[in-house]
Structure formats: structure tokens, C-alpha cells
């Protein structure tokens, strides 16, 4: 955790925390550990998959926009085919985001609305900066590692080629842009085994926030 970033006094009823970071920077791992402490976790990547499941309006709109080549034989979304299109083409990516983001944001609101008033709600939002969502949260947590290590981890976790990993990275905000909006920075460059202890400290720090 960076000592340079003070946690601000928070506003609002529920304790709304944004957890962001670039691809394979460790967001989901930190999010799961926070959920283990009692936070409600709203996983935007997970929601972005749910809103295009077979039979959804989301999948219908994506197929209408990008054509049958992005629909797999089983009727589900061919995610690899769609990734190949949109990460090579910013205008295609903007069209996809125009379909997916409103659906994800509406569902995220619904999930949060089911939480009790004092609940800490952690929104795992990969594109917090890109989608201009920073202002809606009490605290912004950023998972941070060197971009070359992100590429290595994405390749190992997802079986991506280096080109594929780098094209996702270049579709995202820069490390500097993220650090500029962070209230709390979690350095995930260490071993995975060190992260539970780091998140224990993070949880304690969140208890000290003066929520109003
Ligand atoms: C193109 C798609 C089908 C590729 O699917 P795939 O299973 O390979 O990736 P998945 O959705 O699991 O995302 C993995 C990671 O890729 C990165 N990523 C995803 N979408 C984007 C995007 N539009 N811009 C930049 N990075 C992105 C994020 O770091 C994310 O954590 C998918 O990423 C997608 O639908 N993207 C648009 C929706 C979106 O913006 N999702 C981000 C969270 S709301
Ligand atoms: N110290 C560490 N902290 C977090 N993750 C680590 C660490 N060391 C290795 N990893 C690995 O890095 C990979 C990426 O982690 P994770 O899935 O949490 O990232 P993410 O930011 O949620 O990724 P994405 O946005 O692409 O879904 C995982 O395979 C994880 O096990």
C-alpha cells in the first residue's frame, strides 16, 4: 500500500469502493480477499459476461452489430472472435462498449441496491477511468504492477499471445492515469502468498475511513 495516498472522508449511504487496475494486475484476487472479510463484491467483468449470455438482449445487440461471425456454433458469444475484432479497432470497441457498459452499470446498481445500508460494497471495475466512473465512489483502490509483468501474467493466465496481451493493455488507461486517481495503491508485484496479509491491512484501513 502506498503511504502517499490518504483515504478521504467518505460520503453516501453505502460504502462504495472502486477496485481498479489494468489487465492481470490482481484486481479479482484482491476483490475475493476483500469479500472474505465481509465486503459485497460486484464483479464488472463477471457482469459483462452475464449480459451477453445466450438469449439475452445484450447478445442480440452484439450479434446485430458485429454479425454472425461473433456467435459460436452453440449460440453463445464467440469471445475470442469478438476480441480479435475490437482490440484491433477502437471504433468497434467503442460500439461494443456502448452496448455492454449500460447493461453492466444497470445490473451493478441492482446488485448494490440489495446490500444493507452500512455494507462495504467493492466494485471491481477494470475500466473505471476509461468509462469516466471515478467520481461515483468514496474510495478508489488501484492494483499496480509493472506493465511488462501484466503482460506476462495475462499470457500465463489466459493463454494469450504477447501481441494479444499488449493490444488489451494499450486499449486501457495508463499506469500513471490510474495512480493519479488512487486513494490506495496495492502493489501486486510480490508473491501471491503475500497478498492475504496485504489485504488484511487494507481491510483494517478501510475500517478507519470516516464514512458519513
Ligand atoms: C471483447 C470481449 C468479448 C473479450 O472477452 P474475453 O473473455 O477475452 O475477456 P474478458 O471480458 O473476460 O475481459 C478480460 C480483461 O480484458 C480487459 N478488457 C475487456 N474489455 C475491455 C475494453 N473494452 N477495453 C480495454 N480492456 C478491456 C479487462 O482488463 C478485462 O478484465 C470482452 O472483453 C468484452 O465484451 N469487452 C467489452 C466489455 C467491457 O468493456 N468489459 C470490461 C468490464 S465492464
Ligand atoms: N502478487 C500477486 N497478486 C495478484 N495476482 C497475482 C500475484 N502473483 C501472481 N498473480 C496472478 O496474476 C493473475 C492475474 O490476477 P487477477 O486475475 O486477480 O487479475 P485481474 O486484475 O483481476 O485481471 P483481469 O482484469 O484481466 O480479469 C492471476 O493468475 C494471479 O494468480
Image (cartoon, helix red, strand yellow):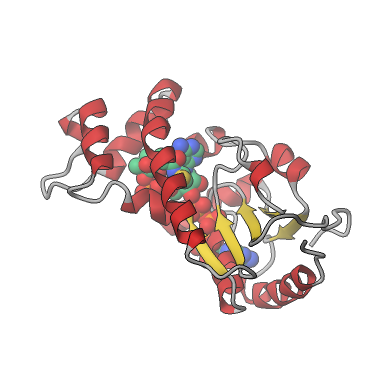
Seen at 50% across and 60% down, the residue is: 113
Residue 202 visible within the image: yes
Q: How far across and down, in percent of the image, does residue 78 sit?
A: 24, 43
Query: Quadrant of the rendered structure where residue 103 is?
Result: top left
Left or right, 163 with reference to 29: left
Q: Is residue 79 above or below residue 32?
A: above
User: Please, which residue is most extreme toward the left here?
Assistant: 73
Q: Give the position of the N terminus as an image quadrant.
A: bottom right
Seen at 34% across and 34% down, the residue is: 84
The number of discs equals: 0
Q: Give the position of the C terminus as an image quadrant.
A: bottom right
Left or right, 148 with reference to 184: left
Q: How far across and down, in percent of the image, does residue 42 sit?
A: 50, 60
Q: Is residue 143 above or below residue 191?
A: above
Q: How far across and down, in percent of the image, does residue 172 sit?
A: 56, 36
Residue 88 visible within the image: no
Please name whichever residue, 24 or 100, is drawn nearer the observer in this view of the structure. Answer: 100
Seen at 55% across and 56% down, the residue is: 124
Q: Is residue 161 above or below residue 208?
A: above
Query: Quadrant of the rendered structure where residue 83 is?
Result: top left
Q: Is residue 191 above or below residue 7?
A: below
Please name whichever residue, 118 or 46, is drawn nearer the observer in this view of the structure. Answer: 118
Seen at 61% across and 35% down, the residue is: 132
Q: How far across and down, in percent of the image, does residue 133 sit?
A: 61, 40
Amino acid at each position: 500500500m502506498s503511504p502517499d495516498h490518504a483515504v478521504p472522508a467518505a460520503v453516501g449511504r453505502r460504502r462504495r469502493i472502486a477496485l481498479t487496475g489494468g489487465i492481470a494486475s490482481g484486481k479479482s484476487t484482491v476483490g475475493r480477499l476483500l469479500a472474505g472479510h465481509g465486503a459485497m463484491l460486484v464483479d464488472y467483468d463477471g457482469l459483462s459476461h452475464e449480459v451477453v449470455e445466450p438469449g439475452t438482449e445484450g447478445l442480440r445487440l452484439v450479434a446485430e452489430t458485429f454479425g454472425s461471425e461473433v456467435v459460436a456454433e452453440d449460440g453463445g458469444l464467440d469471445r475470442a472472435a469478438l476480441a480479435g475484432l475490437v482490440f484491433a479497432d477502437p471504433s468497434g470497441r467503442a460500439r461494443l462498449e456502448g452496448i455492454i457498459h449500460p447493461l453492466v452499470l444497470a445490473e451493478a446498481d441492482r446488485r448494490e441496491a440489495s446490500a444493507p445500508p452500512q455494507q462495504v460494497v467493492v466494485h471491481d471495475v477494470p475500466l473505471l477511468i476509461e468509462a469516466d466512473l471515478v467520481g461515483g465512489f468514496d474510495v478508489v483502490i488501484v492494483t499496480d504492477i509493472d506493465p511488462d509483468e501484466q503482460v506476462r501474467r495475462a499470457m500465463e493466465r489466459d493463454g494469450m499471445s504477447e501481441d494479444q496481451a499488449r493490444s488489451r493493455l494499450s486499449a486501457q488507461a495508463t499506469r500513471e492515469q490510474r495512480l493519479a486517481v488512487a486513494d490506495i495503491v496495492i502493489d501486486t508485484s510480490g508473491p501471491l502468498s503475500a497478498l492475504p496479509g496485504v489485504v488484511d491491512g487494507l481491510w483494517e484501513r478501510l475500517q478507519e475511513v470516516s464514512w458519513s
